[in-house]
Amino acid sequence: MATESSESEEEGKISGGNEKLILDDDLREMGKNAAWSVSSCKPGNGVNTLRDDNLETYWQSDGLQPHLINIQFQKKVRLQLVALYVDFKLDESYTPSKISVRAGDGFHNLKEVKSVELVKPSGWVSVSLSGTDPRETFVNTFMLQIAMLSNHLNGRDTHIRQIKVYGPRPNPIPRQPFQFTSTEFLAYSTLR
């Protein structure tokens, strides 16, 4: 799992953030396989700014809360972590303070997976999608929705600078603990 942000003693509160996104090797970015949409945006600050890998640009919502980011996949995927880049120092009242992450098959059956409160975040903030059971390390879903429920200083619109969605890296050979790639190693990978 990632260690970008520090979670306080209270469940669901995240403070701080890191300038660099630090991840385990067993995670891969899944957002490139999805269709992204937002509930609203200001001209020039649309959904494309969430995925442009530029921390100077941002998506800015326009309208009443909650502000929604929808991530839809063509097939069911395993998701383990959502990383958001937010900056209270630059965005102040535009910085989200309460976020809800929902998953489901589509808009009709989304269920809340995680709800977190951000305390003046600055940098990459990670939201783990794992449940309370240690065996629940990921969410199997067609759709992920990130809802900004409230902002710092009672702000109305939201700024999110980047979002990355990560899932577990698949093992290329089922039930094989090692990931052999050469034919010589594959020939001797099982015992008879």
Image (cartoon, rainbow, N blue to C red):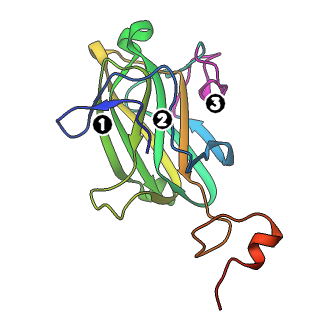
Image height check: is 29 above or below 59? below
Q: Describe the element under mark 1 as helix, strand or loop.
A: strand
**Label located before the other in sequence (2 or 3):** 3
Residue 144 pos. (x, y %): 49, 48
Mark 1 and mark 2 residues within 8 Å of each other at the beta carbon: no
Name, please, the residue furthest toward the right: 183
> Between 50 and 64, which is closer to the camera in this rendering?
50
Residue 120 pos. (x, y %): 31, 17
> Between 63 and 168, which is closer to the camera in this rendering?
168
Q: Describe the element under mark 2 as helix, strand or loop.
A: strand
Q: Which residues are magenta?
A: 39-55
Residue 69 pos. (x, y %): 51, 37
**Disc 2 target residue:** 83
Residue drawn 77% across and 78% down? 187
**Disc 3 target residue:** 51
Residue 126 pos. (x, y %): 42, 35
Give the amino acid type for the residue marked by disc 2 in the picture. Answer: Ala
